[in-house]
Image (cartoon, grey):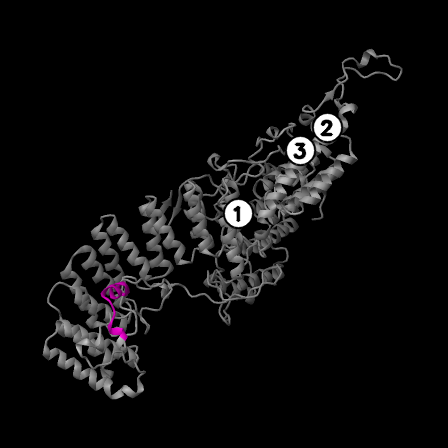
């Protein structure tokens, strides 16, 4: 940034005060320890007790990270900065877009997680915008609202502001950046570099360094920020400040500790002992003061009587004090090295400490889990918090780490921190992953936020994944647990009504089965449970798992069995001319027919058995040669009732098949002792597990591989199947005409300043 230094300082005066405010306000309950040395040059006693955390809030403590995008912006409220002043929203001018810009805006508007399209749009805008700062702000504000952890793009954004506007705007960008990615060493490093080049006042620059070191000063890779601080103090020849910085570095197990210790010893050898001590430190050691300055001839000058003498270390104790000074720091260095030996394996296994949309490989994910296991054993909660904050930068797209973070904070009694992490996960980082919202609903219910839990479920099956069965079932079950019988039924009825309005709904049959089962087992309304099943007559796409469930329900209903009702459903499924919609396989048809025959053998009469057996023989016996051999072995007969019960109660994995697929759990197998000669093809399969453990994973969004390059980050991480949040883009982006109205950009209100621990609105309710 080439501009007059005085002009730069003058234009940035209004923003300099921002350096005085912490990025986050650590709650006192979360602070259990901190820096052993005051960064402002506080006194250092001769024993370890001198190194108390009098400046704990600046070096080594942790608290709430920025609630980026989780504050008033989502309520439509005015966003304020750290000083309580309203932040004006940018008014983007109606800039003329090129055809390519318009096409890319259309793409990212349709899919805000298409990272490749965003980077292409930024590149295209930078190429065409020239000096139009408003166009640049629009694209960066919109992009960083979706990907706030991309510190490289915050740096590029700040560089544009420096080139086209001024230092005050650069400060604004960096302040938003450190709110969004507070625990990034790189963003603080860039911010401090800007401050050094802009401000002449060392106190302003030092305050910014201290803010950054408060959050990342203990990071194993924080050496670049410490080095920049050291370089700055060397340029000022502030040797006492420099010695304090070296002392603080030696407290923490960061990279290159050996170099820092050697540099401290070199500093002490090159300068007098009094030069590297602050005034407070000097008072701890043996200090002698001259009450007056003697003239060379040994006579005192009257004019010099009132001049205070300069304290200096007695030459007789200088060597002793220096040895003591170095020895104390050597003990700190050895202690830090000992701790480093415990974590070095974890740290070296972290190949990508920054955020990227590409997935991490399994060994690196496992390493993060192992590292967290290790650090959670620490008594100092600040270490735990800081490692989790580092983890959810690199693993931001993995809901498992957010869930683990929330649970850890809850277990340690820090409910505010747990809610803070959960809000960031559900609002920003994994907001389109259903599992985080399911977890959030359960978490809120457990902690008494019933309205928040309801909002999560409703958001899931109404907005995020319309018709998401697991959310519907869990919501209804929650209402039933709370004693809200009518509400629990209303959840199902609204979902059923919505599915009935769709043409050939794939979800409706399964939803009816779940509701019928719920009515019978939970509500104890047998009549209504049977009535619900009647709707299946109207369905054209009744599937194998649905039929299995209907037969099972009829078998457990304590009333007269509806043989004709079931027979009509089975006939519709197995008879070729009666089948409509998706045609089932011959094996599935035979299995359903066999299950129904067993049902009739228990509850039917001779006439109904004959009818079903004749149909079965006609359809399947003549085709025996084309079916795989599924003759039961004699050993299968000797299955204990306990084994059958265990099979019936088996719980399916949460990652199974589509409910309309051909491999669901089947009806409990019976032996051939009854003498049926129809196909026993279903015998080798697991018993039907009462369909209460129905697999919902088919409704989860299916991601695709992401192979996007990310700015200037090294493309050394091979692409792999991405199992988390979907950033996939279409194979070919269709060309689109220039829209009449440019899609609205994210306003500045989407970047709220760091709030205190306060209720945060979410889908019409509040975070507590």
Q: Position of residue 391 (x, y in %)?
A: 52, 51
**Helix, strand, or loop for circle 2?**
helix
Neighbourhood count class around disc 2 (C-alpha, 10 Å): few under 14, some 14–19, many 20 upward: some
Question: Do the residues under discs 1 and 3 have CB atoms within 8 angstroms?
Answer: no
At horizontal 19% and vertical 68% (from top left) the residue drawn is: 535
Q: Residue furthest top?
A: 302
In the image, residue 120 above or below residue 676: above
Of 359 and 176, the residue lying toward us: 359
Give how far apart the Cα atoms at labels 1 and 2 are.
Answer: 38 Å
Q: Position of residue 355 (x, y in %)?
A: 55, 55
Q: Please report whichever mark, 1 or 3, sits nearer to the chain's N-terminal start.
A: 3
At horizontal 65% and vertical 46% (from top left) the residue drawn is: 223
Q: Position of residue 572 (x, y in %)?
A: 21, 78
On residue 328, which mark appears? 3
286 magenta-colored: no
Quadrant location of residue 597?
A: bottom left
Question: Do the residues under discs 2 and 3 have CB atoms within 8 angstroms?
Answer: no
82 left or right, relative to 668: right
678 left or right, relative to 334: left
On residue 387, which mark appears? 1
Q: Please report whichever mark, 1 or 2, sits nearer to the chain's N-terminal start.
A: 2
Query: What residue would you read off at disc 2?
Result: 321
In the image, residue 508 above or below residue 269: below
Give how far apart the Cα atoms at labels 2 and 3 are.
Answer: 11 Å
């Amino acid at each position: 940034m080439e501009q007059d230094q005085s002009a730069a300082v003058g234009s940035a005066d209004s923003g300099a005060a921002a350096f005085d405010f912490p990025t986050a306000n650590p709650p006192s309950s979360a602070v259990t320890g901190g820096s052993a040395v005051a960064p402002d040059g506080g006194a250092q006693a001769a024993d370890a007790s001198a190194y108390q955390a009098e400046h704990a809030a600046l070096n080594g403590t942790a608290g709430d990270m920025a609630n980026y995008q989780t504050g008033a912006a989502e309520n439509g409220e005015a966003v304020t900065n750290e000083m309580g002043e309203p932040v004006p929203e940018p008014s983007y001018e109606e800039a003329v877009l090129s055809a390519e810009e318009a096409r890319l805006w259309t793409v990212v508007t349709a899919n805000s997680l298409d990272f490749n399209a965003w980077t292409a749009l930024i590149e295209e805008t930078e190429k065409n915008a020239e000096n139009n700062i408003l166009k640049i702000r629009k694209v960066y504000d919109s992009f960083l609202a979706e990907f706030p952890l991309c510190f490289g793009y915050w740096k590029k954004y700040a560089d544009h502001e420096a080139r086209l506007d001024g230092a005050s705007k650069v400060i604004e960008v960096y302040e938003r950046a450190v709110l969004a990615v507070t625990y990034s060493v790189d963003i603080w490093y860039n911010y401090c570099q800007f401050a050094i080049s802009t401000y002449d006042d060392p106190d302003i620059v030092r305050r910014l360094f201290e803010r950054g070191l408060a959050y990342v000063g203990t990071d194993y890779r924080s050496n670049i920020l410490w080095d920049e601080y050291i370089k700055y103090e060397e340029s000022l020849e502030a040797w006492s400040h420099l010695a304090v910085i070296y002392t603080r570095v030696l407290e923490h197990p960061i990279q290159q500790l050996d170099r820092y210790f050697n540099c401290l010893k070199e500093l002490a050898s090159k300068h007098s002992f009094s030069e590297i001590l602050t005034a407070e430190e000097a008072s701890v050691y043996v200090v002698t003061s001259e009450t007056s300055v003697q003239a060379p001839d040994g006579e005192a000058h009257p004019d010099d009587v009132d001049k205070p003498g300069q304290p200096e270390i007695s030459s007789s104790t200088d060597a002793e004090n220096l040895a003591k000074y170095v020895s104390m720091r050597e003990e700190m260095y050895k202690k830090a090295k000992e701790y480093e030996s415990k974590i070095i394996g974890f740290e070296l296994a972290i190949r990508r400490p920054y955020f990227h949309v590409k997935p991490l490989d399994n060994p690196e994910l496992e390493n993060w889990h192992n590292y967290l296991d290790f650090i959670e054993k620490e008594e100092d909660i600040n270490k735990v918090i800081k490692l989790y904050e580092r983890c959810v930068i690199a693993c931001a797209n993995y809901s498992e780490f957010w869930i683990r973070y929330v649970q850890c904070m809850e277990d340690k009694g820090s409910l505010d921190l747990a809610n803070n992490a959960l809000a960031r996960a559900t609002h920003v980082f994994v907001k389109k992953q259903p599992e985080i919202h399911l977890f959030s609903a359960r978490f809120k219910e457990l902690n008494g936020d019933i309205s928040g839990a309801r909002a999560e479920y409703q958001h899931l099956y109404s907005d995020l994944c319309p018709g998401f069965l697991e959310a519907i079932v869990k919501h209804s079950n929650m209402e039933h647990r709370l004693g809200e019988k009518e509400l629990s039924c209303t959840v199902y009825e609204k979902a059923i009504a919505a599915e009935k309005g769709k043409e050939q709904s794939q979800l409706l049959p399964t939803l009816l089965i779940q509701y019928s089962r719920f009515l019978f087992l939970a509500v104890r309304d047998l009549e209504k449970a049977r009535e619900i099943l009647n709707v299946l007559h109207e369905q054209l796409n009744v599937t194998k798992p649905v039929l299995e469930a209907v037969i099972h329900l009829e078998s457990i209903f304590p009333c007269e069995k509806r043989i004709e009702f079931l027979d009509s459903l089975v006939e519709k499924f197995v008879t070729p001319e009666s089948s409509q919609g998706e045609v089932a396989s011959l094996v599935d048809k035979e299995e359903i027919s066999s299950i129904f025959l067993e049902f009739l053998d228990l509850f039917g009469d001779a006439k109904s058995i004959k009818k079903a057996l004749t149909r079965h023989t006609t359809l399947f016996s003549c085709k025996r040669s084309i079916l795989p051999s599924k003759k039961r072995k004699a050993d299968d007969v000797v299955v204990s009732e306990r084994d059958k019960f265990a099979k019936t109660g088996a719980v399916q994995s949460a990652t199974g098949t589509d409910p309309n697929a051909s491999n669901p759990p089947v009806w409990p197998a019976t032996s051939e002792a009854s003498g049926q000669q129809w196909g026993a093809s279903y015998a080798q399969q697991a018993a039907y597990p009462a369909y209460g453990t129905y697999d919902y994973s088919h409704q989860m969004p299916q991601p695709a591989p992401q192979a996007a390059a990310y700015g200037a980050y090294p493309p050394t991480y091979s692409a792999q199947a991405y199992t988390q949040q979907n950033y996939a883009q279409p194979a070919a982006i269709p060309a689109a005409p220039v829209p009449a109205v440019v899609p609205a950009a994210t306003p500045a209100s989407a970047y709220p300043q760091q709030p205190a621990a306060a209720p945060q609105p979410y889908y019409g309710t509040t975070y507590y």
